Image (spheres, rainbow, N blue to C red):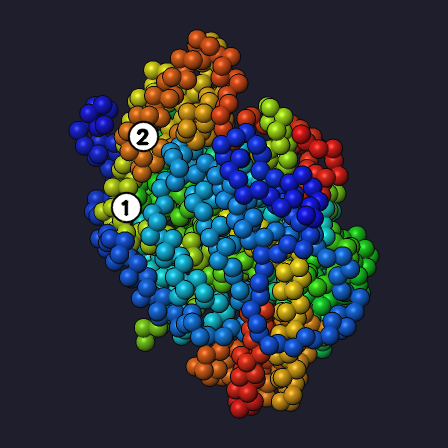
Amino acid sequence: MLADLGMGSLEDLFAHVPKEIRLQRPLALEKGRSEFEVREWFSGMARRNSAARRDLVIFAGGGAYDHDLSSAARALGGQSAFVTAYTPYQPEVSQGVLQALFEYQTLVARIFGTDVANASLYDGAAALVEAVNLAVGATGSSRVIASGGVNPAYLETLATFGAGRSLELEVAATDEREATAWGAPSGQAAAVVVGYPNYFGTIEDVAEARTVANDLGALLVVVADPVALGLLEAPGALGADIVVGEGQSLGIPLSFGGPYLGLFGASTRYLRLIPGRLVGETVDADGRTAFVTTLRTREQDIRRERATSNVCTNQTLMAIQAAIHLSWLGKEGYQEVSRRCYNAAHYLASRLETIGLRVSSAPFFREFVVELPIPAEAVRSRLFDQGFLAGLAVRGRPNHLLLTATEAHTREEIDRFSDLIAKEI
Amino acid sequence: MPVTGDHAGGRASSAPLVGRESEPTIFELSVPGRLAYYARSTGVPEWPASEIGAHLRREPAELPEVSERDLVAHFTRLAARNYSVDVGSYPLGSCTMKYNPKFADEVAEMEGISRVHPGTPERAIQGWLEILSSLESYICTITGMAAATLQPPAGAAGELTGLLLMKAYHRSKKRDPRKVLIPDSAHGTNPASVTLAGFEAVTVPSGPDGLVSVEALRSLIDGDIAGIMLTNPNTLGLFETKIVEILELVHGVDGLAYYDGANLNAIVGVVRPGDMGFDIVHSNLHKTFATPHGGGGPGAGPVAVAEKLVRFLPGPLVRRETGGDLRWHYPEESIGRVHGFYGNAVVLARALAFMRYLGGEGLKRMSELAVLNANWLRWRIQDSYTIPYGGVCMHEFVASASSIKKSSGVRALDIAKSLLEEGFHAPTVYFPLVVEEALMFEPTETESPQTLAGLADSLIRLAVIASENPELLAERPLRTPVRRLDEARAARKPVLTEDQRTAAPSAS
């Protein structure tokens, strides 16, 4: 090959790269290893993650939940035709990914109760950022009123990216039952943001948030837990303009926080401002049904500096995984998982109340805040040694724990956990 | 038998593979009451839903009702209707569609990697922190930078993160420059990110050699320049040989230099962005470091920076305590987090697995072979297609169908679509914008000389058909799962969900 190019060595390919910047020594990295040795290195690392040992019972949520995952969904999502393709720029040979995304968009829109949904964003935090960007573009205002019950990591991400274009972010405090106290904000705003249920588990009054948004001429952005919507009314039916959420609960392993899945649904009023890919139906030259990415003029590669989003690569594989998982659950299973999460979390809360602890979140779905008489971190640490991930610390409240339970938890696990907590306090 | 539509219940047959039939949607396969779901026995008692009151869902979400067997048949058939790297060559320029080694899948699926909650105490995640710390060190060694955030979940997210770091740097010096320079050949994400970061994109024209025009750049330099964003090699696959001079001009007004790592696959172990003078570097791990593209994500776009910017990085970072344990660390002047957790962690682990597999020498050889393959493919097709820029190219090159179009009417699009019929994925078309009828090829290092020869033969054959029977190419592809689509129809009246589909008159 080199001879065809009139060259004598691989070095000749780089002869035009100025010498003074060329690396004159080998990269200071270890030498390569066989796959067996690399796998062994990672096995060693995996063993040092005692967090993953088989008997650890996880009562921590906060946007990442331990659910049962079916073998069928795992196997189907792992097919190399999905895993090793790229963005379906050539629809003639990408109908598998495109149709799976079309089905995903339908599932998300039906769960959220929105007209449409996009083909995914990076994660729940990114979906919120994009929703706010849309609202800013639609209203011309750069002021956002967000509930303090929204996941704090999402609010921090929103503040980080909002700094670019001077977003004015106001956070409304939460009250004694962990619900938003909106006060009476006046003036104009781009968006009102509320969690549903919120980070502390409380099922917020979305209708009230809608009224606040109306008073400010703002879009209502709901950050929803998709698993909750098997039991709770769809945010779209409650007046949300945009519904976003973290899709990890829809068949994606805990994965130390990623890759997860940003869910994004919206009213068709904002169709041309929706970020990310959209897949639509059309026909081919023979009149057969086919799918294609559409409304591409919204996107960064065409609109460039006038684009309202820079999203290119998103989380397609996770979206396909979610579509498969939701289809495995089906209409009945989806409602049942939701109900089972609700049952388990309430059973856990009732056991903790029996031993004299106070649960503040009300009404809650599958997550709640509980107050302990001693520092929560100490309890978390001691329970970890006994095989439990005892929830998450609550920022600024050292004696509080955020706990969750899902359909994967048994009564025996909940009883054992409650008994251990009783001994600690 | 209770069926509700033509396709309800599905048929576990291979018709969509061997025939010309579309695959029904999962919703069309649905039969009321059918179920794959099977929950564990937990013994958890039922809790009354009355507490939820007015927030109880009135109409259940209409999810499909299918058996596991039919679910598997459906998604397996969909997979069969999709091209992928595992099937064949995917020379999609600027996307670096290289082969993704299988052992990394096994790493990603280890329980100690995949079943870890992000809220776990630090002492129980020392393995994960070691993985992240090791990856940060590899990235810094490869790019010549001091530290890196691994949070950005894709290249575009990395760009925006880097630009916000640029903003924080200027603010720390009580400056507020507005403009970011971008060459006219840049990816669309660059100008979009610049706008989202609150800067103004200023386009730098290329010279006739396809490189940034230093003279034009000089005339754009003033005190309002926040920085410059460049890929090197650029999107034409050409190395910016005057890079040192270019960056000195920008640094001369205290601007910062951002390296877009989209094309990093050309230079690993050969030349480092840090040694060129860049201050901020993002790497697309799903390109250069072989994590699978997943049909359009997940990716990962870590951002590495020079020493003077470390204090602004998003937290948390992983740092070693004096006792040897790894801990989360939040830089004091951090711009704040850019991901809900720690980024696409499992993608990060896969990338590290690839780096450890190749090692220092292997990574350099990777780039050398990527450049060799691109140059050789270009050499093979240079008599059939216009090559607008001569000299040695790097890991990719741009050809043009402009002369073919002039003589036959056959467009770059027709060549791309016809290549699908030949069994290869198409190149990137109509990008970069500075080349007419652009066909952008990036063969990557993982394709054999025989594969490249086959690809070249197909391209040469298509050029011949273009001159002899151009109308044939306008029809192609004929034998792919579907033929060319009516994209205007999709955009005119968007049908984005099954519900919009059933509300509108049927497409077929």
Find numbered disc 2 in the image and state the secondary structure of the residue it sits on.
helix
Residue A163, image quadrant: bottom right
| Residue A387 visible in rendering | yes
Q: Is residue A304 visible?
A: no
**B451 sits left or right of A343 in the view:** left
Left or right, B47 with respect to B436, comes to right
Q: Nearer the viewer, residue B453 or A96?
A: A96
**Residue A348: x, y in percent?**
61, 79
Q: Tell me which amino acid carries mark 1.
A: Leu
Q: In which quadrant of the rendered image does the N terminus of chain A lie? A: top left
Badge 1: few (under 14), some or many (20 or more) residues near its Cα, within 10 Å?
many
Q: Is residue B389 above or below residue A239?
A: above
State which quarter of the image contains the C terminus of chain A.
Answer: bottom right
Q: Can you tell which quarter of the image residue A231 is in?
A: bottom right
**Numbered mark located on residue B451 in the image:** 2
Residue A384: x %, y % from top left: 46, 79
Quick check: B467 left or right of A330?
A: left
Question: Which quarter of the figure has residue A145?
Answer: bottom right
Q: Are marks 1 and 2 on the same chain?
A: yes
Q: Is B505 positioned to the left or the right of B425 in the image?
A: right
Chain ID of residue with mark 2:
B
- Residue A181 versus residue A425 in the image, above or below: above
Q: Earlier in the sequence, mark 1 or mark 2?
A: 1
Residue B44: image tag: none
State the residue at coordinates (67%, 39%). Answer: B6
**Residue A95 x %, y %:** 54, 36
Q: Position of residue B77 (x, y in %)?
A: 51, 41
C-alpha distance separating marks 1 and 2: 22 Å
What number is the disc on residue B363? 1
The amino acid on which the numbered mark 2 sits, given as a three-letter code, is Thr
Q: Residue at x 54, y 51 (%)?
A: B69
- What residue sits 34% from the left and 23% below the top? B456
